[in-house]
Image: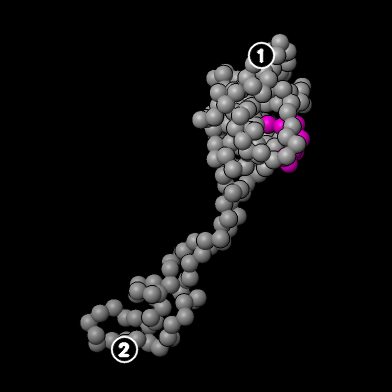
């Protein structure tokens, strides 16, 4: 697949880059993408939920009424789950929600997501750029030049750039990632993917 390279002002530069069909032109596998997104979201869960069970409730241990002759069911403890303030039956306990996904499955999911973006014309390649100092206004200018100031965007760099990261972190709909750490959830959770030229070359 041949993609045009745009300047940061949104103008054509006359340059093109070839994106490998093995990554950007595969047949999207919806089930694999679902599994990758499910794994990502599961890993974000803290899993620290907890309720007190009968043995953990701090209340009196005396027998609250005599065994027989009351006309009601027998009751031996105020900690019973049947009474207000008692323990919880089978309540949630701390657990780890993460699960394993094979590397090839995760790679196929990422490639499927990239191919979906290409098919929907939601991918743009721009020339490499760098900020001397962090400046949100400068990154907003780039988004306006590309006509993406109102859309949810994901900027993909070849390597970490601190000034670029600081320039866009205050923009609610603007996210940033490096090419080697791209995940399926981030790709599917954006309206437009912005690839820098060096990031695009890293896929070949």
Where residue 174 sits, quadrant-wise, is top right
Residue occupying the point 57% across, 47% down? 42
Percent from the top left, x then y, of residue 124? 63, 21
Write down the quadrant of residue 158 in the picture. top right
What color scheme is it? one colour
Query: Total marks drawn?
Result: 2
Give the quarter of the image for residue 139. Answer: top right
**Residue placed furthest toward the left:** 71
Q: Which residue range is magenta in the image?
A: 156-163
Quadrant in the picture for the C terminus: top right
67 and 63: which is toward the camera: 63
**Residue at the spot of label 1:** 12
Local packing at callout 2 (Cα closer than 10 Å; few below 14, some 14-19, many 20+) is few
Instruction: Please tell me whether mark 2 sits on a helix, a strand or a loop.
Output: loop
Q: Residue sitting at 43 percent across and 66 percent down?
A: 89
CA separation, marks 2 and 1?
A: 88 Å
Say what secondary structure mark 1 lies in.
Answer: strand
Q: Give the image location of residue 97, x and y in percent.
A: 58, 51
Comparing labels 2 and 1, the label whose residue is closer to the camera: 1
Q: Residue at x 64, y 33 (%)?
A: 138
Q: Residue at x 29, y 78 (%)?
A: 73
Residue highlighted by disc 2: 66
Q: Looking at the image, is 157 positioned above or below residue 12? A: below
Within-10-Å neighbours for mark 1: few <14, some 14–19, many 20+: few
Which quarter of the rendering shows the N terminus?
top right
First in sequence: mark 2 or mark 1?
1
């Amino acid at each position: 697949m041949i993609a045009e390279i745009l300047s940061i002002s949104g103008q054509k530069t006359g340059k093109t880059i070839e994106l490998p069909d093995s990554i950007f032109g595969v047949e999207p596998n919806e089930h694999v993408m679902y599994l990758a997104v499910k794994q990502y979201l599961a890993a974000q869960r803290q899993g620290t939920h907890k309720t007190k069970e009968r043995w953990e409730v701090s209340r009196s241990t005396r027998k609250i009424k005599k065994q027989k002759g009351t006309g009601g069911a027998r009751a031996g403890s105020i900690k019973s789950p049947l009474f207000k303030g008692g323990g919880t039956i089978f309540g949630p306990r701390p657990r780890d929600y993460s699960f394993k996904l094979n590397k090839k499955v995760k790679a196929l999911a990422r490639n499927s997501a990239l191919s979906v973006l290409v098919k929907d014309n939601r991918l743009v390649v721009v020339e490499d750029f760098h900020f001397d100092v962090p400046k949100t206004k400068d990154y907003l200018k780039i988004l306006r030049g590309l006509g993406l100031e109102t859309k949810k965007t994901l900027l993909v760099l070849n390597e970490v750039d601190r000034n670029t990261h600081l320039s866009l972190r205050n923009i609610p709909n603007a996210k940033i990632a490096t090419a080697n750490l791209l995940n399926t959830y981030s790709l599917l959770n954006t309206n437009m993917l912005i690839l820098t030229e060096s990031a695009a070359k890293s896929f070949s």
